[in-house]
Image (cartoon, helix red, strand yellow):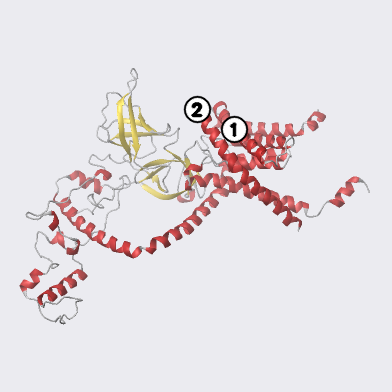
Amino acid sequence: METILTRYRNLTVLLIVVVAQLLFLAYQVKANKDDRLIRVWAVSAVTPMAGGVDAVRHNTIGFLQDYFILLDVREQNRKLKAENDKLRMENIYFRNELANSADAHALMVFQAKTPSKTVAARVVGNSTVATAKAVFIDRGSTSGIEKGMAVVTPEGVVGKVIAVYPLVSQVLLVTDPTFKVGVESQKHHVHGILNCGIGHCIVEQVQDEDKLDVGEWFFTSGEDRLFPRGFPVGTVISSAPGAPGQGMRDVKLALSGQPGGAEAVLVVLEGVHQEIPSGPVMADVHVAPLPLPPGQKDGNAPSVEQVQTEADKIVGKYQALGKEENHVYGAVGSSVPDFNLRKTAPAAAAAPAAPVPQASTTTAVAPAPVAPQAPLPLGSPRRKTTSTEAPAPPSPQP
Amino acid sequence: MNESSDNLLRRRPRDSWFSRFQILGLVVLTLFAIIVKVYLPRIIPSTSWLELPLLLTVYFGLVYPNQIAALLFGAFVGLCEDSLAPANLHPIGMFGITKTLVGYFAASVSMRFNVENAFIRLVLCFFFYLFHALMYWLMRRALLDQNVPFDPQEILIYGALNSAVALPLFLLLDKMKVSGSRSAIL
């Protein structure tokens, strides 16, 4: 026996190592638990380095990016200022629209707040198994994260925490084949199970009789006891009757968030169910500006220059003075204007930038004091950055 | 003076330090390979095919024709990888067993072939990638009863890509080994 073991020493060691691992594997599968100590050691050794690499990348590439961005920052600043003025004007229009609108749904969408308690985290790495859709985030048990907590972004659902270590956690993404989420449609309140593990997302367990519109939103239903009810999931791409005899509908879904590409996520520490919004979802909200005043054409629309800041007022005052005294600023040979000359009433009225103190238009022209903006509700998707869309929700007004 | 005492006299006192240095270097390289596997797909999503831990295991097996050392190194690399995988899908030992076998067979092959030849290295890396992928797939199906898709075309392409990466990587590791030994001797 001893001779055989000595002769086949290498093979014996191989068998021992493989059998030992097989037994350990069998124990894990049978007992449905693994050796946490090995994982804690490995994760604690690797993830801080991954975090360090990430920090180095941010600080080097980010610095270079900042340098090149700053090269044309002045021009960009000028453009942004003009854009900001334009947006402020649109904001005033929108406030008026909201204040006068009888559409309570839009207001409810803006006023809705998520009562869930969340903590922000950054994605620092992927899993070592290519087929498993899992990532590491830089928050662990020291931040109050526990196994089974939901992970979301304002755009949609991301996944759930499957392992917690002191400084990092592992999150299984909704795109993993083993992950299912209970969902409910917004309009027809059709319930189903989201499955994104087959390359695309489908909603299973939807009866043929159920009605669904293309573009209809799906939200988390809360039935999976993981995601609180009311988080946006995605929109229906197609809805068609399934194979004959099965009685189930084929529903394809486009996720509103990007679980795999998310850089920053929110872990729901204390989830509270919300109502599924009956009105338009934040991303779909489109508030048209008020119609132009009678007799005013598009070309006469209030321009950016009409925005009343203190500087605008001073410029307007001097321009009016110059016009009154036939002075052209910057022109050679033009006489020196008398800045102490008091303006006459018609001149003041002719000033292009002078404010018109009318009760009905004051709020529209003057820069109304901006009330502190209420934070976007967690469950609401971010609005698109087009000029015609709704700005950030205003604070509740009496 | 007998033969063993001659051997003792001939052994340089720095040999032990040199081997320790090599082990430390291997541990650092292993950690680096695993970090690359975990982190690189976050920056470049199309690099998930890169199997640096496997290439490192193959390299170690080819360079050190000691089957026991190679299989133990393969087990170490595999278990490290297993530890970073989701526990519910991937119990510890899946990569461990696969890479143990890869390390053992790589060391066995190195005893019979001239593994310094670039073409042989290329072929061996391709073969071991296929072996690793097939073995892993079989284990997931047979031991864990998981219905994992197996795409032969994808495996072949990824195998070729990994072999292409292996050639310059092995040359680099060869140089590191030489410079490491020189610095140790000096």
Alpha carbon distance from label 1 to label 2: 19 Å
What is the crowding at mark 2: few (fewer than 14 residues within 10 Å), some, or many (at least 20)? few
Quick one: which residue is furthest to the left in this view? Answer: A346
Q: Secondary structure at mark 2?
A: loop
Q: Which residue is mark 1?
A: B130
Q: Which residue is mark 2?
A: B147
Residues at badges 1 and 2 in contact (C-beta under 8 Å)? Answer: no
Residue type, mark 1 in image? Leu
Q: Position of residue B98 (x, y in %)?
A: 62, 34
**Quarter of the view holding residue A12:** top right
- Amino acid type, mark 2: Asn
Circle 1 Cα neighbour tier, 10 Å, few/some/many (<14 / 14–19 / ≥20): some
Who's the residue at 49% across and 55% down the image? A57
Residue A250 is situated, as x and y percent measured from the top left of the image, at 33, 27
Q: Is residue A103 left or right of residue A227?
A: left
Chain of the residue under the numbered disc 2 shown in the image: B
Q: Is residue A299 above or below residue A344?
A: above
Which quadrant of the structure image shows residue A208? top left
The chain identifier of the residue carrying mark 1 reads B
